[in-house]
Image: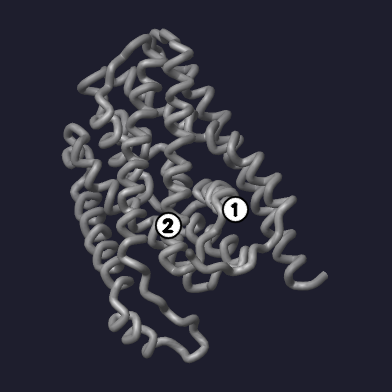
Amino acid sequence: MNRRSLLRVGLTLLALLLLVLAGRTLWQQWHSLQAQPVTWGFVPAALALAAFAGALTYGVLIDSWRRILGGYDHPLPFPVAARIWILSNFGKYLPGSLWIVAGMAVMAKGEGVRATAAVTSAAIMQALALVSGMVVGAFAPGALAALPAWGVWVAGGLAVVCVSGLAFLLSPRALAFLQGLLPAAAPRLEPIRPSALGVALLGNLLAWLGYGCAIHFLAAGLFDGMDIPIATAAGTFAVAYLAGLLAIPAPGGIGVRETIFSVLLAPAIGIRAAVALAVASRLLMTLIELALALPAALQRRQGGPQAPTSSP
């Protein structure tokens, strides 16, 4: 068996492991949701809108990543980019925050994307999520008070590093200097087009708004018309998500994200409803991911490597 076959078998086994972990998480979330002592008032139409908003948000994020690849003159067709993004996203169920980046980079490289563009584009998406999430998180009531002091400092430091790194990627001179420090065999570093970076940043901001819409409709669908403003929902979700991202040992930020989410919303809707909504939001996003993973996996089996292309 050659190296490529071994890699394919390894990736297949890893994908199966991640799906098992995701299914176990889904099962735990379902039981946690049933155990919450709250009065439910289901509104199917609102729940359907919540699922639609969540799925549409994933589409925005996928297209944002495509824009970044386009900034390196290597765009991917949307279905191919969707397959890579959705399947690599299951890496969050493994401890550590770099599995998603590694998965996106490896799978993109398998489609003919240059090594530099594959790795850099995946890292840029994480940086944009952090920077835009901190901006949107300002709309969450008591966001800074909910985070421990070290969490605020770490998040702020990471935001500064991310902004500096994004600015670095725009400068040919800075990249040329860094290239000179690398081994001669290292891939050539290339600056990204500012327009691609700007569009991707806008896409990330819209994605947080989409998450806010999903939480808004989810609350209305579970508690018969409960009204959480979209801006508040988006800010709360952003702060909780970033807290989970910083909790590197926790796969997918499980436990951390739900705790921060509950603390932020408890003053407005009560602690029981806040905990129930936190668990339900995780359940909703996991269901959407699993629903999108099946067609993505089937596409993987049918498709092959894409030849490098240039943007029009």
Residue at point 32%, 36% (across, down): 209
Disc 2, disc 1: CB below 8 Å? no
Residue 40: mark: none
**Is residue 158 in view?**
yes
Q: Is residue 110 above or below residue 133?
A: below
Q: Quick one: 162 or 10, which is closer to the camera? A: 162
Pointer 2 or 1: first along the chain: 2
Callout 1 crowding tier (Cα within 10 Å): few <14, some 14–19, many ≥20: many
Badge 2: few (under 14), some or many (20 or more) residues near its Cα, within 10 Å?
many
Residue 156 coordinates in the image, percent (x, y): 21, 55
Between 98 and 182, the one lying in front of the other is 182
- Quick check: 57 left or right of 24? left
Residue name at image x 29 percent, y 83 percent: 173
Which residue sits at x=33%, y=71%? 169
User: To which quarter of the image does residue 70 belong?
Assistant: bottom left
Under circle 1, the secondary element is helix
Q: Position of residue 94 (x, y in %)?
A: 53, 50
Quarter of the N terminus within the rendering: bottom right
For the residue pair 32 and 109, the one nearer the viewer reads as 109
Give residue 80's mark. 1
Rounded to the nearest angstrom, the CA distance separating label 2 from label 1 is: 14 Å
Q: Nearer the viewer, residue 111 or 102?
A: 111
Q: Is residue 110 left or right of residue 162?
A: right
For label 2, the SS is helix
Residue under the image location 54 percent in, 58 percent down? 76
Q: Quadrant of residue 241?
A: top left
Q: Amino acid at mark 1?
A: Val
Label 2, on which residue?
67
Image height check: is 37 above or below 210?
Answer: above
